[in-house]
Image: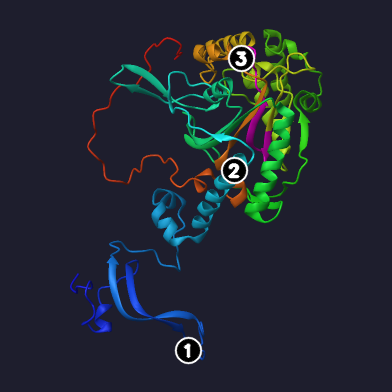
Amino acid sequence: MATNLNNTSDIPFAVQHDDIRRGDIIGIKGYPGKTNPSRETNPGELSIFAQETTLLAPCLHQIPSEHYGFKDKEERHRNRHLDLIMNKRTRDTFIKRSMIVRYIRNYFDNNGFYEVETPVLMKNAGGATAKPFWTHHNDLNMTLALRIATELPLKQLIVGGINKVYELGRVFRNEGIDLTHNPEFTTCEYYEAFADVYDVMERTEDLVEGLVKTICGSLQTKFHTQSGEVYEVNWAKPWKRVEMIPALEEACGEKFPPGDTMHTDEFNQFLKRMLKKTGVECTPPLTNARMLDTLVGEFIEEKCINPTFITGHPEMMSPLAKYHREHAGLCERFEAFVCKKEIVNAYTELNDPFDQRLRFEEQAAQKAQGDDEAQVMDEAFLTAMEYGLPPTGGWGMGIDRMVMFLTDNYSIKEALTFPFMKDDNNAPKAKAAEVTDVTPKPVEGVSK
């Protein structure tokens, strides 16, 4: 800079401005007052009447003009700092996100729960149906996975006697990127001893209703979709409850086989026939769980605009949920949907170690059929269960999706401060670095 603005007391005020450009951060010495009441614009505005200015930090790039703005989504997500400078709505979204996280944390703290932390690097990536990211620990020569859920270690804490636990944190899933999915995202999982799925339903309604009222000021919100549809959402409890199998029977026009046969090859053939009959496409592998989930997405989830509990999942879709107390082959589980998207997955936790081992073996069979998202056998968790997991209820909530719905953003990228982005082909190419092979090596208790 031509002028030293660090000491401006002897420099004429006009000269102090010669080197100041749009976007610079400046300090001002002056006195407060109001602008002339007779001014045509902003009369009587509270102001600082500057006598000296000091350049605190120069902006070395040209800031977009206010007239044209900074609207290109790709550029906004890559340059979040500039997005925040130019777009008030982006700042408001992240402020609301902070308020949402604070409310959820306070809710659990005020209801006797203890916030805990569990490992991110794990020998087994369990607790959800998803494909993990793999890495390698050099010193111990161990292949590890980034966690895909916090469920299993949290339930081990329940075994240890901490009867109310929760964790807010990042999880990682090696999956595609779309409007509602990002490879790393934030979840809240909680578990409560001596509670069941019905207690969890009540707590979910209570928490979410209070959250929406606090953040939005009303239980009536609007959500604009990518296609331009506008959903008017009523978050007030009680929420609608839909039984999965009866709803599918109505949609398909046929009676489904009994729940205790839904793991068989005969049911597999039945589901393939239902897909063909209804014209619904399902991506391979055509496992029972994947085909049934596809039908649910087509005929039930698409109708869930207001908060809705979908209940009555088969056991073969729910390897960690307790069997239903009345209906054989089903389990005590629900998924909460809003605006056609899942926000909560919950159940009465399976606490029978022998049944849990059978469920893991069923998952292994699905993995053998080609489903690389099926869960793996976790001997450490099974051993912990053998010490006695009390009757427990709990859930996992997607924080990013709650932010989307409560800030009216149809893309998850708008709810994440720094969303995952593909390589920028226009960026300067850096010299390729040597890459360590992190392909999973055979490790006891870990399946590829």
Write down the quadrant of residue 284 in the picture: top right
Q: CA distance from mark 2 to mark 1?
A: 47 Å
User: Is 230 included in the stretch rendered in magenta?
Assistant: no
- 73 sits left or right of 284 in the view: left
Mark 1, Cα crowd under 10 Å, few <14 / some 14-19 / many 20+, is: few
Give residue 46's position: percent from left, percent from top.
48, 80
The label nearer to you, 1 versus 3, is 3
SS assignment at label 3: loop
Q: At 23% across and 73% down in the image, what residue appears? A: 5
Q: CA distance from mark 1 to mark 3?
A: 76 Å
Image colouring: rainbow
The quarter of the rendered structure image containing the N terminus is bottom left
Q: Is residue 158 something one can see in this rendering?
A: yes
Q: Which residues are magenta?
A: 336-352
**Secondary structure found at label 2:** helix
Q: Is residue 325 left or right of residue 391?
A: right
How many numbered circles are shown? 3
| Residue 182 in sight here | no
Relative to the observer, which residue lies in front, 133 or 26? 26
Between 259 and 431, the one nearer to me in the picture:
259
Q: Sequence order check: which comes first, mark 1 or mark 3?
A: 1
Query: Residue 266 occupies which quadrant of the picture?
Result: top right
Mark 3 residue crowding within 10 angstroms, few (<14) / some (14–19) / many (20+): some
**Circle 2 sits on which residue?**
104
Residue 307 percent across, percent down from the top left: 71, 41
Residue 36, label in figure: 1
Q: Which quadrant is the C terminus positioned in?
A: top left
Q: Residue at x 46, y 11 (%)?
A: 445
Q: Nearer the viewer, mark 2 or mark 1?
A: 2
Amino acid of disc 1: Asn
Residue behind mark 3: 388
